[in-house]
Amino acid sequence: MAEPKEESVMDTISDKLHGRGGSSSSSDSDGERTPAVRAKTYRLFGREKPVHFVLGGGKPADLFLWRNKRISAGVLAGATAIWLLFEVMDYHLLTLLCHCVILTLAILFLWSNASTFIKKSPPNIPEVRIPEDLAVNVARSLRFQINRGFASLREIGQGHELRKFLIVIAGLWILSVLGSCCNFLTLFYIIFVVLYTVPVLYEKYEDKVDAFGEKAMVELKKCYSIFDEKCLSKISKGLSKNKKH
């Protein structure tokens, strides 16, 4: 009676071992498949990292991606109120700053003098100072970005990057058209609203946008190859002949 039980136990153990081997082989096959699938997925502008990391991470990225809806809505409402004050109501920045300072100083002055009659503590006005480290870091980051922009412009001006040249020309032309239609504050507000809406919508519909972007990039590459074959190659050949002469 003990021998059939031992045989059944051995059979179940062997079946489990074979089942584990099959699962491991399937997991290995899945592991071999996943890199191929990941390699085939297209991301807009060659992006390999999440949108949150591309936007710089931290609190600014949280604001643009609406991680905290109350804070993001408050910042957007404040920007809208500033735009309405300066554009719709024709309020000026210097006038607004002077009125705010006058109102604040008047309230603090009256409160400090009236505290003795009301028998309440005077206002605790904090001492505000800009830290030296913060100012140095901001200046260094601005210096780095400005120098990087100058280096890119110099490289484009030397005729090394044709694609960057076309992108910069197209971007400056779009900005010039927008600048002729509206002033700087309205343009800044439009860019601010775009930053608050486009990244969060892109993160929500990422797969659909990437698929559409892949098709658009294929068509753009075709158009660029045709333009290069018919125009740019002839221009480069003409310039090389002139240099030889």
Image (cartoon, rainbow, N blue to C red):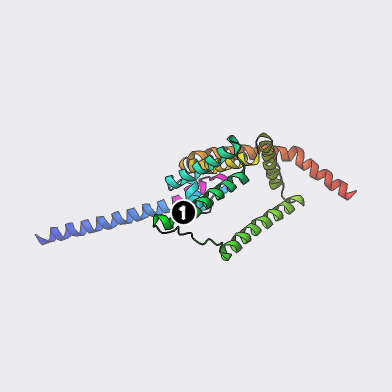
Name above or below for residue 123 compared with residue 194: below
Asked whether 158 falls inside the magenta stretch, the response is no
Q: Which residue is mark 1?
A: 111
Q: Looking at this view, name the residue that lies furthest to the left.
A: 1
Q: Nearer the viewer, residue 115 or 55?
A: 115
Image quadrant holding the N terminus, namely bottom left
| Residue that appears at 75% across and 37% down | 230
| Residue that appears at 67% across and 40% down | 175
Main secondary structure type of the part rendered in magenta:
helix
Mark 1, Cα crowd under 10 Å, few <14 / some 14-19 / many 20+, is: some
Disc 1 element:
helix
Magenta residues? Answer: 33-45
Asked whether 35 falls inside the magenta stretch, the response is yes
Residue 49 at least partly seen: no
Residue 113 drawn at (x, y percent): 47, 56
Q: Nearer the viewer, residue 198 or 209?
A: 198
Residue 23 at least partly seen: yes
Amino acid type, mark 1: Trp
Q: Nearer the viewer, residue 73 or 233?
A: 73
